[in-house]
Amino acid sequence: MRAKSIQVNPARHLRGKINVPGDKSITHRALILSSLAKGGSVIKGMGRGLDCLATQKIIKRMGVVIEEGEDLFVQGRGIHGLEEPGDVLGCGNSATTMRLLAGLLAGQNFYSVLSGDRFLRERPMSRVTEPLTMMGAKIWGRKRGHFPPLSILGSPLEGIRYSLPIPSAQVKSSLILAGLYAEGETCITEPYQSRDHTERMLKFLGLPIERDDLTVRVKKLTSFPGREISVPGDVSSAAFFIGGAAILEGSHLRVLSVGLNPTRMGFIDALRQMGADIEVHLEGKRSGEEYGEIEVRGRRSLEGTTIEGDMIPRLIDEMPIVAVVSCFAEGQTIIKDARELRVKETDRIRAITTELRRMGAEVEEREDGMIIKGRGYLKGAECQSYNDHRMAMALTMAGLCAEGRTKIRGSDCIDTSFPGFWTTLEGILIE
Ligand code: S3P
């Protein structure tokens, strides 16, 4: 297992311009859909974290030729062109890889097995295996389909109407991908809007998808040509630096060419609610996704806020850094309706509470969130990442804003989504 520790010293400011890696969610979808196209696709600016590389490797194992350079060239094999893999498909730590591919593989005409590292093998999969089974999928996993490995015997599928019990883009996308191989219409309704990259990319590729508020409808796929797909910078990776710069007075940070999809902007809304000085400059739309620049200036005073309801899916991955910022905001920050955090890369409610308390924060753990009483200060401590990339990056920002030195055990997991994180940080760090 990857581990390694890192020491973080207090910083004065974060200043300058940065680029962040290509969006992880969009990259997974670009890889999967381009492999089904007829002919070549070029993916520009893709994320090269370990999660995206896991999806890339699996697609290659099903016979898709990929040429790697600055851009990625994917020679799509058409909608029925994937080949039965000769071995178990390793998803590493990536739940997005496993859940999206479970949907895709359910409707193929071959057998496949999806597995992952010991952390992924403890993450819930019945949220996809149950509705996929309703569509006619033959899919098995440990504990009655609840845990990986997932073993999938591709079979004919039928469209269903399904209301997601929780807002989840992974589940929605898994069912959309299965729906592309199903007879009739697949109709999926969410309680709140989750990220909509799959829907946007299908539309961009000219595939039949209809959206009406919280409902998405798809029909069986027909042949479609490959295209050039541009992936914007990952706003979830940018969030750590934006959060750090918002805390450190006198900071001035510009994040260039980053994705500005509204379903991902909850973090910016939350920070603004707290009084952070953030400007968003929309520059345009590429491959169906808005992109532009985010500019943040560090302010002396931030205020506590409440984060709940439909805002949660729009900032679910940013919660560790929201919690860090809350420690520097005056008054209480209340986070609720966020039970999903308990089944992310780690139980993030427990992990955030434990680690921020180590750093002197006053945090109350709740079943579906936490209450943080901002004291405007954290102290350096010895912390751990729980092998969770977003915990490691959030704790790094906490360490930069704390008094005294912070040690983070298990910092290597940052490569899951953000190889180059430390170099990016060095470029803007003023000690
Ligand atoms: C993702 C969806 C979210 C998010 C994950 C990526 C995606 O998960 O937390 O990092 O790419 O669809 P859920 O759909 O489980 O909320």
Image: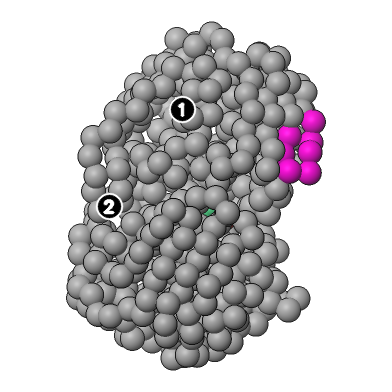
Looking at the rendered structure, the secondary structure element under dot 2 is loop
Drawn side of residue 112 relative to residue 140, left or right: left
Looking at the rendered structure, the secondary structure element under dot 1 is helix
Drawn side of residue 14 relative to residue 127, left or right: left
Magenta run includes residue 365: yes
Q: Residue at x 53, y 73 (%)?
A: 161
What count of labels does the image hold? 2
For the record, the magenta segment spans 364-370
Mark 1 and mark 2: Cα distance apart in space = 24 Å
Identified by mark 2, the residue type is: Gly
Rendered location of residue 91, percent (x, y): 53, 67
Question: Do residues under tags 1 and 2 come within 8 Å of each other at their CB atoms?
Answer: no
Q: Nearer the viewer, residue 69 or 34?
A: 34
Which residue lies under the disc numbered 1? 242
Specify which label sits upstream in the sequence, 1 or 2: 1
Locate the N terminus and report the quarter of the image it occupies.
Answer: bottom right
Q: Residue at x 33, y 78 (%)?
A: 221
Identified by mark 1, the residue type is: Ile
Mark 2 close to ligand 1, CB under 8 Å:
no
